[in-house]
Amino acid sequence: DGGITQSPKYLFRKEGQNVTLSCEQNLNHDAMYWYRQDPGQGLRLIYYSQIVNDFQKGDIAEGYSVSREKKESFPLTVTSAQKNPTAFYLCASSQPAVGRNEQFFGPGTRLTVL
Amino acid sequence: KNEVEQSPQNLTAQEGEFITINCSYSVGISALHWLQQHPGGGIVSLFMLSSGKKKHGRLIATINIQEKHSSLHITASHPRDSAVYICAVLTSGSRLTFGEGTQLTVNP
């Protein structure tokens, strides 16, 4: 089945450790996105990539890094510089070229930093 | 002030009731999305619209571009409709700006 997978669903890390969240899609989409969701707030864009080997900062990129070496993969690293990393992280993808740009979301990873 | 405002923030209804969730935005958009998020966290796209009205089963979405307003209606609501409903607008390029969501609870 086509879709977006994120793993793991729940992730626990100690403060000060970097952690990488996985996002894979088999929809052949060019664009991929990482969002952060906190209680009582709307989703906020961390980073996005419109094509392989290229990515741009979103609204809250500080303390995060990404790579886009393959079309189907867009991993997000939460670094120790991120002051409040505990949150729900959602990955999405879309195909802007077809004019609809409907975004498809993964199931999310809930990160807890202890 | 957020660029996308939803109301109400929380909504409790009895099974069978007609439900309306509203979304107002303050920026120019090329499209508006209605999304559904269940307790597990996964998000499903319900509608994407840029004008008029769309219907899918018991769900209806409308948009008024001049008034910068959209509504999501649920007819004959059911407990399985309980979820967070999120409005998001497509502004520049491929970026979405999200509302804070409306928590809907439908009681049997």
Image: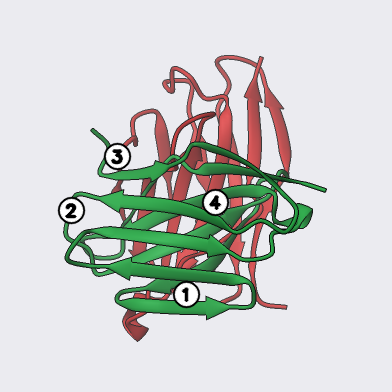
The residue at 73%/78% (across/down) is A1
Give amino acid for label 1: His
Q: Are marks 1 and 3 on the same chain?
A: yes
Q: Residue at x 30, y 64 (%)?
A: B94
Colour assigned to chain B in the rendering is green
Chain letter for mark 4: B
Same chain shared by disc 2 and disc 4: yes
What's the residue type where badge 3 is placed? Asp
Chain A shade in the render: red
Work out how far the residue at label 4 is from the one at label 1, CA to CA, in angstroms. 25 Å
Q: Vertical placement of B16 versus A42: above or below?
A: below
Q: Which residue is mark 2?
A: B27
Report which residue position mark 1 lands on: A29
Determine which residue is flagged by label 4: B85
Q: Residues within 10 Å of mark 3 (few under 14, many from 20)?
A: few
Q: Which quadrant would residue A4 be assigned to in this image?
A: bottom right
Q: Chain of mark 2?
A: B
What element does badge 1 sit on?
loop
Q: Residue at x 34, y 36 (%)?
A: A61
Given the image, on which type of amino acid does mark 2 rest? Val
Q: Looking at the figure, which quarter contains the N terminus of chain B?
A: top left
Give the structural element (helix, strand or loop) at label 2: loop
The x, y position of residue B102, in whole percent, is 52, 43
Task: Give the alpha-carbon distance from disc 1 to disc 3, as whole Å.
Answer: 22 Å
Number of other residues with Cα within 10 Å of mark 4, as a class: few under 14, some 14 to 19, many 20 or more: many
In primary-sequence order, the first of circles 2 and 4 is 2
In the rendered image, residue B97, in percent from the top left (x then y), is placed at: 33, 50
Residue under label 3, please give it. A59
Q: Are marks 2 and 4 in contact (CB under 8 Å)?
A: no
Residues beneath discs 1 and 2 located on the same chain: no
